[in-house]
Image (spheres, rainbow, N blue to C red):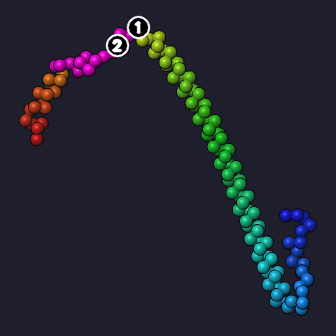
Amino acid sequence: MAQGSDSNDTSYKSPSPGSRPSSSDDVKKVMRREKNRIAAQKSRMRQTQKADSLHLESENLEKENAALRKEVKQLTEEANYLSSVLSSHEPLCTGLAPQTPDLLYSPHQSSFHRQHIAVPHYQR
């Protein structure tokens, strides 16, 4: 609000058309203006507090975002490194050859489990 404004000046009285207002009307006007002034102050204060809290939250989110970006970069570098280690090791390792389900589960193990489950104790 402008410095030269008369909104805080309670002695200001606007000229009223017709007869002069009574003293109680003047008191009501002054009280209403004071109430409005206080309400406006509170509103501005709440608005300022809200803006401050949003600003702080924004700063915190930016810091968190920077930390997450740094972590993603480190994890990407680690993944690339581990991929290169794996690629260089694959030719040396025979255990990584494609396996069929028969090789993963030998017939002995499968028949053992079928026999084990066929025992009456487990069929309840």
Estimate the x, y position of residue 84 in percent, counting from the top left: 50, 15
Judging by the rendered image, the residue that carries numbered circle 1 is: 92
Estimate the x, y position of residue 85 in percent, counting from the top left: 48, 14
Residue at 30% of width from left, 16% of height from top? 99
- Residue 63 lies in magenta, yes or no? no
Image quadrant in which you'd find residue 120:
top left
Height in image: 89 above or below 24? above
Q: Residues within 10 Å of mark 2 (few under 14, many from 20)?
A: few
Report whether 87 appears left or right of 98: right
Looking at the image, the residue that sits furthest to the front is 18
Report whether 81 appears left or right of 107: right
What's the amino acid at mark 2?
Answer: Ala
Residue at 89% of width from left, 86% of height from top? 17
Q: Secondary structure at mark 2?
A: loop
Between the residue at mark 2 and the residue at mark 1, the CA separation in whole angstroms equals 11 Å
Judging by the rendered image, the residue that carries numbered circle 2 is: 97
What's the amino acid at mark 1?
Answer: Leu
Residue at 49% of width from left, 18% of height from top? 83
Looking at the image, the residue that sits furthest to the left is 120
Report whether 109 appears left or right of 119: right
Which is nearer the N-term, disc 2 or disc 1? 1
- Residue 102 lies in magenta, yes or no? yes
Q: Which residues are magenta?
A: 93-108
Looking at the image, the residue that sits furthest to the top is 92
Height in image: 83 above or below 39? above
Checking the image for residue 64, the label placed there is none
